[in-house]
């Protein structure tokens, strides 16, 4: 089953490494949903069994579930 995740790269990750990781996400059955400009990373759908593989990559700083955030007063 696939879920949505936010993937953040470590600073100064080379573009060819970023491209390879995006390709790996697609090869695992996932898809890139949005690429961020304020942080080095993207949101994606990703099969649950590939999250640990992605998290272990030396250029990945963080992989977190993408969740809806709301503000209440």
Image: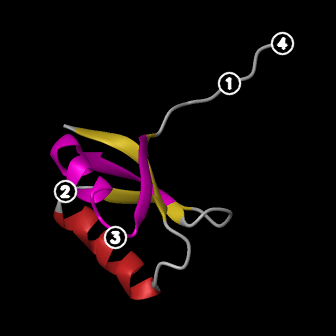
Whole-percent x, y for residue 33 in the image: 45, 56
Alpha-carbon neighbours of circle 2 within 10 Å: few (<14), some, or many (≥20)?
Answer: few
Asked if the residues shown at circle 4 and circle 1 are in contact, with their CB atoms under 8 angstroms apart, the answer is no
Whole-percent x, y for residue 37 in the image: 65, 67
Under circle 3, the secondary element is: helix
Q: Earlier in the sequence, mark 3 or mark 2?
A: 3
The part of the image, by quadrant, that contains residue 16 is bottom left
Alpha-carbon neighbours of circle 3 within 10 Å: few (<14), some, or many (≥20)?
Answer: some
The residue sitting at 30% across, 78% down in the picture is 20
Alpha carbon separation for disc pair 2 and 4: 40 Å
The residue sitting at 62% across, 29% down in the picture is 69
Q: Earlier in the sequence, mark 1 or mark 2?
A: 2
Tell me the tag on residue 29.
2
How many tags in the picture?
Answer: 4
Q: Earlier in the sequence, mark 2 or mark 4?
A: 2
Q: Which residue is mark 1?
A: 70
Q: Which residue is mark 4?
A: 73
Under circle 4, the secondary element is: loop
Q: Nearer the viewer, mark 2 or mark 4?
A: 4
Alpha carbon separation for disc pair 3 and 2: 11 Å
The quarter of the image holding the N terminus is top left
The residue sitting at 62% across, 62% down in the picture is 39
Alpha carbon separation for disc pair 4 and 3: 38 Å
């Amino acid at each position: 089953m696939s879920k949505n995740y936010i993937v953040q790269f470590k600073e100064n990750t080379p573009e060819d490494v970023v491209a390879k990781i995006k390709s790996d996400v697609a090869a695992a059955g996932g898809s890139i949903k949005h690429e961020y400009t304020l942080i080095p990373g993207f949101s994606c759908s990703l099969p649950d069994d590939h999250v640990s593989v992605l998290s272990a990559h030396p250029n990945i700083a963080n992989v977190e579930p993408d969740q809806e955030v709301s503000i209440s007063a």
